[in-house]
Image (cartoon, rainbow, N blue to C red):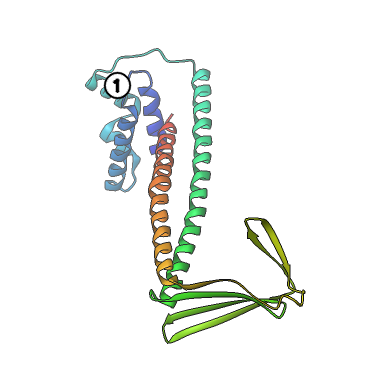
Amino acid sequence: MDKTEYIARLSIALDEYEINNKYEILADYEQIIDEILIDFDNDFNEVINKIGYPEILALEIVEEFGFKAIHIKDKSDQELDKNKYHTKRQNTNVIWNIALAVHWFFQTCFIIAFASLVSFTLYFGLDSKLSINQTIENNTQKVELNICKTNNDCQTLLFETPGLVFENSHRGGMHKYNYDNDDLNIASLGNVDNLPIGLFGLVSSSVFLILIFINYLAVYKPVKGVIQRNQQHNRRRAYE
């Protein structure tokens, strides 16, 4: 006999009585058996000597706490109920594990975005500003990005797109201008001056940090708690 068989026999013996805390009793005696085995070098005979055979121990527990006998279902009915319950708990665990995987997917995306924004903010600095100048010149759309870490430390990026159609919205509707038209040589498409990208990066990274924390509290902790309770319940059901 080993610990698993002992606990299983004790569980079967206790099934004949009305015991609300049966699994707590089994867990307590499982711990007691572990302690005895540690003290006596895994000699299971000492377990029998200390607490007796499981059927005798069950009678002692029933007598000590005054549990009442109940009518036991047919064995085939017990096995059917057990299989149905186990399948239901197992399916529930699968669903919660999928929910946990979805959580980790979004959490990973949030963490990557947060790290990228923090790196972006540290690289350019909190005082950095962005200016955008969009023009059409010589049948070409030009977008000039001017990034300044400080007033004296600026970087300019120029993007050119030749021969496209530009659409501009007015109250009268959409008006199209073809860059290939020689009559359209220079036109302004709108400018953005001194956009505080350092402040934008700081605010955006703070938002993603909050999302990471909320995702942890609202999804990870509840889902992980349900999975752990299911695992514990299934472990107790295994005694049967």
Instruction: Kindly identify the amino acid type of the residue bearing the numbered disc 1.
Output: Leu
Q: Which residue does the image show at 73% across and 73% down from the upper left?
A: 179
Q: Position of residue 220 (x, y in %)?
A: 42, 48
Figure quadrant of residue 200: bottom left
Q: Position of residue 150 (x, y in %)?
A: 41, 82
Name the residue nearer the viewer: 68 or 100: 100
Figure quadrant of residue 115: bottom left
Q: Which residue does the image show at 43% across and 59% down from the upper left?
A: 208
Q: Pick out the residue farthest to the front.
A: 172
Q: Is residue 177 left or right of residue 152?
A: right
Q: Pick out the residue farthest to the left.
A: 64
Q: Is residue 169 left or right of residue 221?
A: right
Name the residue nearer the viewer: 46 or 66: 66
Tell me the crowding category of disc 1: few under 14, some 14 to 19, or many 20 or more residues within 10 angstroms, Cα based. some
SS for callout 1: helix
Q: Position of residue 228 (x, y in %)?
A: 40, 42
- Position of 110 relative to 130 (above/below): above
Q: Quadrant of the N terminus?
A: top left
